[in-house]
Image (cartoon, rainbow, N blue to C red):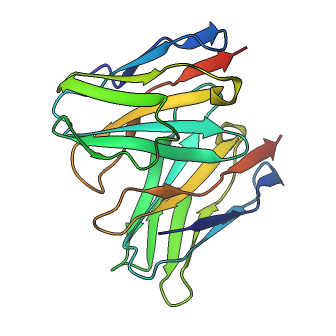
């Protein structure tokens, strides 16, 4: 089955700097790649997703890139703010299987 | 819409006791998922339903775990008997379609002593 590796497990950045989180997946048939943000004491919430027919997608300060050949995708957050501090999860799925999540990255934005 | 509603938010019980976690999905969502979250294993899918029918329960760790969805607006996850290693946060999530946004509840934090 699908396996998703996520790096780094923790990331600290200064406010205003950029943050990048990377994920690799094992099954080349995977075609859907969402990113979820989990704040303390809450459930994960979708922040952006990308499908395999697209190489990059942006939404304000957040962007996701996908490299199908290398089987990896990344989350980019620019101009980080303290409210970006949370745990971020990447995930992948093939059309007929449920999402497989990475282990998460704890992002701390230092003011 | 109120979102996915889970209860209880916190449960502390003793080993051997039965635990029942409850979930009300968002109305109109055809898929319901139960996840378990721990530091060591991250987010693990336990089971999911499509139109109230269990589709894949391969993630259920043992026969001590069972899940039901008697109607479109209610699901339960039961652990009987509970063990300390079952301590985790259990999330319920629902989605309108396959590969659509998952809406998570706030989770049920279970502690088994």
Q: In this rendering, would B76 be left or right of B16?
A: left
- The picture quadrant where one finds residue B11 is top right
Q: Is residue B29 left or right of residue A77?
A: left
* Quarter occupied by the C terminus of chain A: top right
How far across and down, in percent of the image, does residue A7 sit?
Answer: 72, 64
The quadrant where residue A95 appears: bottom left
* Residue placed most toward the observer, A25 or B87: B87
Residue name at image x 58 percent, y 52 percent: A89
Number of numbered discs overlaid on the protein picture: 0
- Give the x, y percent position of residue B16: 61, 14
- The image quadrant that residue B21 belongs to is top left
Q: Residue at x 46, y 47 (%)?
A: B59
Return the x and y of residue B47 as percentages of the image width and height. Answer: 38, 42
Horizontal side of A7 relative to A1 (left or right) equals right
Q: Is residue B9 above or below residue A80?
A: above
B95, B10: nearer the viewer:
B10
Residue in the image at 78% along x and 48% along y:
A15
Rendered position, B35 above or below A15: above
Q: Is residue B93 above or below residue A15?
A: above
Q: Position of residue B45 (x, y in %)?
A: 47, 46
Residue found 54% across the figure and 19% down from its top: B81
Asked whether A87 or B52 is in front, the reply is B52
């Amino acid at each position: 089955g699908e396996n998703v590796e996520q790096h780094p497990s923790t990331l600290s950045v200064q406010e205003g700097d950029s943050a990048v989180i990377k994920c690799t997946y094992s099954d080349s048939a995977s075609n859907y790649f969402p990113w979820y943000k989990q704040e303390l004491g809450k459930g994960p919430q979708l922040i952006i997703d990308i499908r395999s027919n697209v190489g990059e997608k942006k939404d304000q300060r957040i962007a996701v890139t996908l490299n199908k050949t290398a089987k990896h995708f990344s989350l980019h957050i620019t101009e980080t703010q303290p409210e970006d501090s949370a745990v971020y999860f990447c995930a992948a799925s093939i059309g007929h299987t449920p999402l497989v999540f990475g282990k998460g990255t704890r992002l701390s934005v230092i003011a | 819409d109120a979102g996915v509603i889970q209860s209880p938010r916190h449960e502390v019980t003793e080993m051997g006791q039965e635990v029942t976690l409850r979930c009300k999905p968002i109305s109109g969502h055809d898929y319901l998922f139960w996840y378990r979250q721990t530091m060591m294993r991250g987010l693990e899918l336990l089971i999911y339903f499509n139109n109230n029918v269990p589709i894949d329960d391969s993630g259920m760790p043992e026969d001590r775990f069972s899940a039901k969805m008697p109607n479109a607006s209610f699901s339960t996850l039961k652990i009987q008997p509970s063990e300390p290693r079952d301590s985790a946060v259990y999330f319920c999530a629902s989605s309108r379609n396959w590969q659509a946004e998952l809406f998570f509840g706030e989770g049920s934090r279970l502690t088994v002593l």
